[in-house]
Image (cartoon, rainbow, N blue to C red):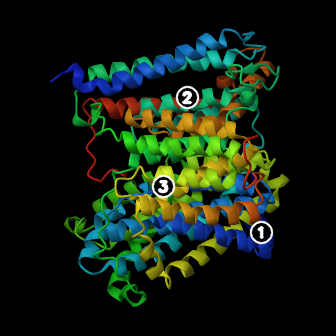
Amino acid sequence: MRNLLSQKKDYYAGGLMVLIGIGAVLEARHYSLGTLFHMGPGFFPIILGVTMTCVGILIALVAATSQATADDQLHIPKPEWRAWACILAGPVLFIILGNYGGLIPATFACVFVSALGDKDSTLVSALLLAVGITLFGVLLFSYILQVSMPMWRWGSL
Amino acid sequence: MALGVPVIYSALTDLWYGFGVALEPHNILWCFVGVLIGNIVGVLPGMGVLATISILLPLTFGMKPVGAILMLAGVFYGAQYGGAICSILLNLPCHPPHAVTCLDGYPMTKQGRGGVALGITVIASFVGASWGITEMTFLAPVLVQVALKFGPAEVCSLMLLGLLAGSTLARGSPIKGVAMTVFGLLLGIVGADIETGTPRFAFGMTELDDGVEIVALALGLFGIAEFMNTVNQTAPIDTKYTNVRLRDMWPSRADFKQAFFPMWRGTVIGSLCALIPGTGPTIASFVSYAVEKKVSKTPERFGTGAIEGVACPEASTHSSVQGDFIPTMSLGIPGDAVMALLLGALTIQGIVPGPQLISQHPDVFWGLVASFWVGNIMLVILNVPMIGLWVKLLTIPYRYLYPSALFFICIGVYSTNNDMFQVGETIIIGIFGYILLQLGFHPAPILLGFVLGPRFEENFRRAMLISRGDLLVFLERPISAFFVFLCLVLIIAQIYVRVRAGNGQKTEAVPRPAE
């Protein structure tokens, strides 16, 4: 039962590794190579890049020669777009509000938005969690650990 | 190397000195904080040891090295005590080393003997841990005496062996493990070259001149990527059996008798696994369960609530967890991702890992060994009378956990350099880590390669400089040749196993841990 589609996962996996390997070699070409005796900064990266490319090809080859099992298939679980977006939006908001608003708004936004990603969360539960973590976070990081981020700052960096 | 009475004597005096360090009030406090946090994290389904240690890492920058390492190590072995609770009472293999404990732990719970299972776990854990610590006390100094004679060529081949074992013996496909290790080595290159100062793989970003931040890397891979993978995938928690009280925990005399020898067999297997780089506690627990089933006169009882099936893997896990520290602290070669992270923590504190660590920083090494005793005793005390509290923690839903953890990740990464760039780095690594997870890669070897990479390159370049560019130096020096030989054996064994298993179809009778 050799079906190309059912083994896609390892082809993608190998392909990604080949891409990374070739990318590393292409970038490392710009550094001086040196000799085996006196290695330059480019020597080790090129060895790694070549190794990576070979390993990537090997992954794909092994996938091509082995029988497919259910485990090998690229199965993307039902995309959790909302959850993923919320989880990534949390830290992004933390960066933006941390730079332009201060620790309190950054913490609140980060926790509140990322909490909305869970399908069991409600506005109220996310709100309560965000308030609680903000209070705790400010107490711990501003007062006790003295992280150098003002609690409030508006507009400027 | 002179084995015998003098070694034992000096190890004992050094350990005595270590207790002096570990029992200083602030060090006791840090050790307690570490094991407490570890225990909590271990109980909470869906929180990982790696993520927790990485979050705590930036907070330790201001601390003294001894306190920092005691606390971070405490999180690691503390989590092992907590992790078993989740497996036994909920049948959730949320911590890989305890996945195998589900097999007999949960049936025991269903029979109303969950308390006994937890009780025997605590006893087995302590036995296993004690053995692991004893092994470290006497073995590490001997290993160091050998390792101090190593030149760059030996260090290099030893690292190669460590990396190869770390990537091929861990869970998942060996080739993919190698790919992840090489990827980690590549990430380790990012930043200014040690000899010429040329920025490498920085792509014009000056923030990357100091390299990828280890905290950002670990939290991206084991924090953000993990959350993306787990969110909305968690099974509802069944609290039907979680009502365990202290008086349910004492094993009867018959239970104890049944569990006694399995406990010791597990301990020995665990301590052996700890010495092979790459085979950490997870492998140890799986192997010891399989061995116990084979040795048993009544193998059919396994899987239906046999107490041996709980005692053996748990003892094995703990003896291997403590033994894991031996190659890490004495040779500077981490066996798994957690150890890689601890080595990173040492480096940040300005301590160079390697065989010279024990003589240059005896307070760190012997303080750590002594704190293992202190910490393990604390954990037994924490786990027996307070079991009710830990069981309550099981019911905290994931929707409260991950947003809180995300905040700790952000502030933790930010505070490493007071730089938001690192937070952005973490997000990017997180997205990439999620893609890797979906493609069937286990990201743990990345950390191994990342931590060892710079030292590997340095020693490789130095070895080549000394040998005037002759690659044969790795085979001409006997110790180095031995390590290279072991590497070859490892590769050939992997290929052999794969060919024999009929094109790599592995059937695992054990629930796969949801990492």
Q: Amino acid at mark 3?
A: Tyr
Q: Amino acid at mark 2?
A: Phe
Q: CA distance from mark 1 to mark 3?
A: 38 Å
| Residue ranking furthest to the right | B360
Q: Are marks 1 and 3 on the same chain?
A: yes
Helix, strand or loop at disc 2? helix
Q: Residue at x 30, y 31 (%)?
A: A74
Circle 3 Cα neighbour tier, 10 Å, few/some/many (<14 / 14–19 / ≥20): many
Helix, strand or loop at disc 1? helix
Q: CA distance from mark 2 to mark 1?
A: 38 Å
Q: Amino acid at mark 1?
A: Gly
Say whether residue B30 is visible.
Answer: yes
Which label sits in the foreground, 1 or 3? 3
Circle 2 Cα neighbour tier, 10 Å, few/some/many (<14 / 14–19 / ≥20): many
Q: Earlier in the sequence, mark 2 or mark 3?
A: 2
Say whether residue B134 is visible.
Answer: no
Q: Earlier in the sequence, mark 2 or mark 1?
A: 1
How far across and down, in percent of the image, does residue A87 sit?
A: 48, 45
> What residue does disc 2 label?
B183
Query: Which sits in the foreground, B219 or B151?
Result: B219
> What residue does disc 3 label?
B402
Q: Is residue B269 left or right of residue A76?
A: right
| Residue ranking furthest to the bottom | B247
How far across and down, in percent of the image, does residue A39 sit?
A: 75, 15
> What residue does disc 1 label?
B18
Q: Chain of mark 1?
A: B
Task: Indicate the quadrant where residue A141 lies.
Answer: bottom right
Pointer 2 with pointer 1, Cβ within 8 A: no
Q: Chain of mark 3?
A: B
Circle 1 Cα neighbour tier, 10 Å, few/some/many (<14 / 14–19 / ≥20): many
